[in-house]
Amino acid sequence: MFIYEKKLQYPVRVSNKDVRMAKAVLTQYGGPDGELSASMNYLTQRFSMPLNELKAILTDIGTEELGHMEMVATLFKKLIKGATKDELIAAGMGGYFADHETCPFLVDAEGEHWDSKYTQAKGDPIADLYNDMAAEQKARATYENLIALTDDPLVKDTLRWLREREIIHFQRFGEGLRLYEEYCNSKRYF
Amino acid sequence: MVNYNITNQRLNRQQEMLLEIQKLQFAAYDLALFLDTHPNDPVALYRHKMYTDRLRQVKDEYEKEFGPMTVFSHEFGDNWRYINGPWPWEH
């Protein structure tokens, strides 16, 4: 089961309201390479993983990504807090406001809704682990793009931290892949 | 080294304790991920034990003072302080 713990994984702070940036960071909430896509990938794929190491790493990283969703949603709320009508319209968020006010919703930076087609579960450990390593690199690249879009040092700090997590996850999935390959090779000799 | 208090603002006691929990939990959690793929690494296991022991102490202290962080935590007070703000996205 899952247990909620009432705290963020890492602090989320902003210096100023920035509606344009709020719109951009939403892609890591509900975009193709965002935290929801990553979490659903891993928490689904684990059911067909043959090794305990792989079951554990997919469960734990899939769960951490839920915590990252909470961080991105918090970042969005802090960036959009106190936005005026004119600021929302200028940032292209008039339509968004009509549908969701200032609640974070599962869309990408252009407002496209999240789709389960963003996730993969092939049932084949090699295919799934390569997919997961690619997912981490795409998320890292997205965080780098977001860092390039802001001058706020506090927003950069949160985004940098999230970016680093993608690198750690990539590393762990790479080790998982190696463990699975060793397992396959060892089986041939039995 | 990650700066958990990048703004260098004066933190109240709750924020300070929360920051300490975040630090310890991050250390323990990142070691746990490493242990998932290296379950026999003695140094990682030793460090994980060290951080989780300290984490349990700090979390107990925090929950006694500010209420449960999870629905399975013991409520030491007379009312259910779990619902009290600020919630994590409001800090």
Image: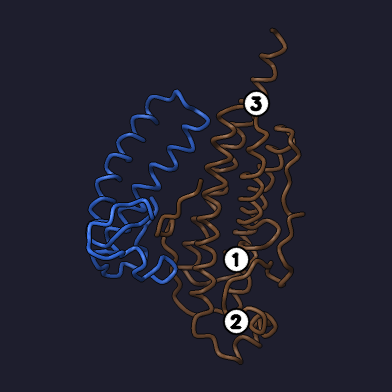
Chain colours: A brown, B blue
10 Å neighbourhood of mark 1: few (<14), some, or many (≥20)?
few
Where is residue A174 shown, x and y percent of the image?
62, 34
Name which residue type carries label 2. Answer: Glu
**Residue A139 higher or lower than A20, as above or below:** above
Circle 1 residue: A148
Spatial distance from mark 2 to mark 3, Cα to Cα? 46 Å
Q: Quadrant for the C terminus of chain A, please.
A: top right
Measure the alpha-carbon separation of dots 1 and 3: 37 Å
- In the rendered view, does B91 fall on the left or right side of B57? right
Name the element at disc 2: loop
Amino acid type assigned to the residue bearing label 1 in the image? Ala
Viewer-nearest of discs 1 and 3: 3
Check disc 3 and report the residue beneath it. A180
- Chain-order first, disc 1 or disc 3: 1
Q: Earlier in the sequence, mark 2 or mark 1?
A: 2
For the view shown, which residue lies furthest in the top direction?
Answer: A190
Helix, strand, or loop for circle 3? helix
Tell me what residue is drawn at x 70 percent, y 83 percent.
Answer: A95
